[in-house]
Amino acid sequence: MLTGLLIKNIKCLVQTEDLPRLKICGSEMSELPFINDAYLYMKNGLISEFGKMKDLQKSKILFQNPEIETIDATGKSVFPSFCDSHTHLVYSGSREMEYIDKIRGLSYEEIAKRGGGILNSAKKLHETSEDELFIQSFNRINEIISLGTGAVEIKSGYGLNLADELKMLRVIRRIKNNSPVEVKATFLGAHAIPEEYKNSRQKYVDLIINEMIPVVASYELADFIDVFCDKGFFTVEDTERILMAGIKYGLTAKIHANELDYSGGIQTGVKYNALSVDHLEFTNDEEISTLIGSETMPTILPASAFFLGMADPPVRKMINAGLPIALASDYNPGSSPTGNMKFIMSLGCIRLRMLPEEVINAVTINTAYAMGISETHGSIAVGKVANVFITKEIPSYEFMPYAFGSNLIDTVILRGKIIN
């Protein structure tokens, strides 16, 4: 009987921690602990031991576990699995026709006004059975696992009525129960204003507060509550009402903020101790000042800005001010049809001028924090969940974001078991 999994002769074991941190801020984001010529031992789904190869013979691993499974990673590196703290990957169909509209020059808001955008996805989802929605979404989960993701947050928000929001959240639960990936669920009923409420937004806000939130909470289908607090969507006043209702039912706040304009969403997120505020394309000194000293993680979604041709947030300014930064994929059919976190790292370097060390911290420890799981995920530390991936032979960890179009992942290990 196999008693554990040992990876030996690791060229570089990345993101090692003796004293695990919850998040990494400011100038410390440019620091990345690693061990060259290393080994990593996993047992019972957890990281049990790691160190330099020269110390492996001194360890009791090989003597106490004669039936141990061993992987020789000569020339290869080992990373903690990516944590993707912002996705909408439970959806039906695709929206490539809107992609063509974008190429022709229509803005995100113009497409939405024509019935596209979120409302288009809501229509498709309404017409799709729960089983079919699960099949489509589970295929995306398997895709992101193969690309190195070991933990993912998934939002509802393409239902926009109680029955369809519950359908989405049940699918998220099925994914959690049937996949080795760590899953967190977010209720995002306040993703857009349904067509039937376009002239009575407050009635829809009341529906979210008085009907949706209590039912979602009663079935324990969500960990977080989110609101799209932005121009043309939900106001600060709407957002505060919805967050207060969610918090009353034990849901932790998250916010879509400042993607389309200065919306006040960042300030609202900090006020309600949101775990993260996400997007942040429109961020200035006032917003940065608000975030300093807070427990709220600024989360950047660079693929969305890239896909939509929007301005990038001032990440260098934010890091220089001492803030932590998380990078997530925003995997969704309209503005970021990818869950490839390695590509997200590359965008962080190319578009946001982040260092390789900064982007690695931003897609591991800091995104784990933005999911509320940095005590158990996001780094190589004894006692943490054994979610890691082995690269192909690469010259250095910096090569990962540098080779932006190459698949460099060789072996995926989740909860101490080889997945592929």
Image (cartoon, rainbow, N blue to C red):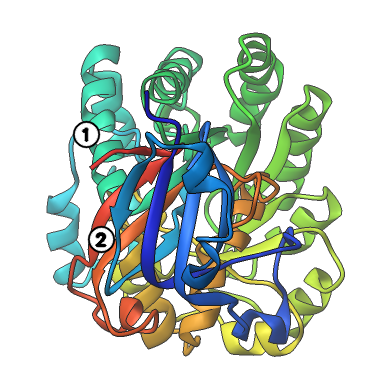
Res. 303 visible in picture? no
Residue 165, image x and y in percent? Answer: 47, 22
Report the Cα–Cα distance between label 1 and label 2.
Answer: 18 Å
Residue 406, image x and y in percent? Answer: 17, 72
- The amino acid beneath tag 2 is Ile
Q: Seen in the image, is 73 located left or right of residue 82?
A: left
In this picture, is 305 found above or below 412?
below
- For the C terminus, the image quarter is top left
Res. 165 visible in picture? yes
| Mark identifier at residue 409 | 2
Q: Is label 1 or label 2 in front? A: 2
The residue tagged with tag 2: helix, strand or loop?
strand
- For the N terminus, the image quarter is top left
In this picture, is 16 found above or below 97?
below
- The amino acid beneath tag 1 is Asn
| Mark identifier at residue 139 | 1
Q: Residue at x 30, y 52 (%)?
A: 71
Q: Seen in the image, is 359 located left or right of residue 149?
A: right
Front residue of this view, candidates 145 and 19: 19
Front residue of this view, candidates 305 and 381: 381
Q: Residue at x 28, y 69 (%)?
A: 74
Q: Residue at x 60, y 52 (%)?
A: 368
The number of numbered discs placed on residues in the rendered structure image is 2
Q: Seen in the image, is 92 located left or right of residue 268?
A: left
Front residue of this view, candidates 142 and 239: 142
